[in-house]
Image (cartoon, rainbow, N blue to C red):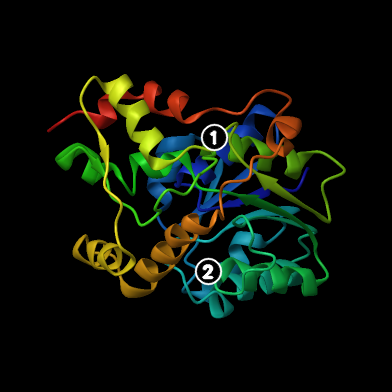
């Protein structure tokens, strides 16, 4: 029997796309996340489901037992990766896992501030075969992190200044991960994955205005003001700090580069921001 591929964060946008990409390729999948029942409902009986809590190391061994490879992603709420994700990597190695595909972020190999850097460093030293996927900002942030402001106030409120962002669709990232997990030639490689074009948040607002038929504006936030905004929305301090740092980096051009690595992996063009906004118009409807 072929060893299953573990997909952590299976209920998230990226994890769900990875599961689907693996199923499309006929690979056996073990979906892992906090809640087992929603995974069973989402993926059906053809996918093994198992409880994983990165804050509880006792859940690690059952997740990786007998697995051949792992898709690893950091939950946004996890900022201390040493006792969580890195211990999970150690458990995977001890269980005989051979390959870990890590969903990192663009620039993590040299940016010591982001927690992904510490996971990458640990993976490199682990002796496991690895693949680093380094995407830029997700198009799905528009429908998650920014959605409340868009729906209630018709605005995008982030501290990005006039920075350009090559938004990547999480479904494309998930498919790329499934390819890296099931095809030879990707071990020991890092991929900088982006969408097809870099756009400003003013341009994103213009796209949404055109698609939705109502005016959406970009309201540039200050760094401290954005942090306070996230706290008012209920984010814990470490999560709000990381999200603020990542968005502030857009001012410096941290996510403006456009590469051809994603369409090369996929064998097709990557989805655009307009593609994403158009595909679920109900998401943006006023309550």
Numbered mark located on residue 85 in the image: none
Seen from this angle, which residue lies furthest bottom? 83
Q: Quadrant of residue 262?
A: top right
Q: Nearer the viewer, mark 1 or mark 2?
A: 1
The answer to whether residue 114 is left or right of residue 158 is right
Confirm whether residue 37 shows in the render: yes
Seen from this angle, which residue lies furthest front? 162
Q: Earlier in the sequence, mark 1 or mark 2?
A: 2
Q: Which residue is mark 1?
A: 171
The residue at the point 78 percent across, 73 percent down is 126
Q: Quadrant of residue 159?
A: bottom left
Q: How many marks?
A: 2
The answer to whether residue 184 is left or right of residue 250 is right
Q: Which residue is mark 2?
A: 59
Rendered view: 38 above or below 62: above
The answer to whether residue 108 is left or right of residue 280 is right
Residue 253 placement (x, y as % from top left): 55, 53
Residue 74 placement (x, y as % from top left): 53, 61
User: Counting other residues with Cα less than 10 Å from the Cα at mark 1, is it few (<14), some (14-19), or many (20 or more)?
Assistant: many
Q: Quadrant of residue 264?
A: top right
Distance from the alpha carbon under mark 1 to that under mark 2: 27 Å
Quadrant where the N terminus is found in the figure: top right
Residue 286 placement (x, y as % from top left): 15, 31
Rendered view: 183 above or below 96: above
Confirm whether residue 46 shows in the render: no
The residue at the point 67 percent across, 43 percent down is 177
User: Counting other residues with Cα less than 10 Å from the Cα at mark 2, is it few (<14), some (14-19), or many (20 or more)?
Assistant: some
Rendered view: 234 above or below 284: below
Query: Which residue is at the front of the view, 70 or 272?
Result: 272
Seen from this angle, which residue lies furthest right? 185
């Amino acid at each position: 029997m072929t060893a299953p591929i573990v997909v952590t964060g299976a209920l998230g946008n990226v994890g769900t796309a990875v599961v689907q990409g693996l199923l499309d390729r006929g690979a056996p999948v073990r979906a892992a996340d906090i809640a087992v029942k929603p995974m069973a409902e989402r993926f059906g009986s053809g996918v093994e489901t198992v409880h994983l809590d990165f804050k509880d190391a006792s859940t690690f061994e059952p997740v990786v037992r007998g697995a051949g490879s792992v898709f690893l992603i950091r939950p946004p709420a996890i900022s201390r990766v040493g006792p969580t994700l890195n211990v999970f990597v150690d458990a995977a190695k001890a269980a005989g896992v051979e390959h870990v595909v890590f969903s990192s972020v663009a620039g993590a190999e040299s940016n010591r501030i982001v927690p992904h850097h510490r996971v990458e460093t640990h993976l490199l030293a682990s002796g496991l075969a690895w693949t680093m996927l380094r995407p830029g900002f997700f198009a799905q942030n528009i429908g998650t992190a920014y959605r409340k402001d868009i729906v209630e106030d018709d605005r995008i409120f982030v501290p990005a200044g006039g920075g350009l962002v090559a938004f990547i669709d999480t479904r494309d990232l998930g498919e790329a991960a499934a390819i890296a997990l099931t095809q030879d030639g990707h071990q020991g490689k890092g991929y900088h994955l982006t969408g097809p074009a870099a756009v400003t948040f003013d341009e994103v607002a213009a796209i949404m205005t055109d698609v939705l038929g109502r005016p959406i504006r970009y309201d540039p936030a200050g760094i401290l003001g954005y942090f306070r905004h996230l706290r008012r929305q209920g984010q814990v301090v470490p999560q709000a700090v990381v999200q603020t740092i990542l968005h502030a980096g857009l001012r410096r051009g941290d996510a403006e580069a456009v590469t051809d690595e994603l369409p090369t992996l996929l064998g097709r063009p990557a989805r655009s921001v307009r593609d994403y906004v158009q595909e679920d118009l109900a998401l943006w409807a006023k309550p």
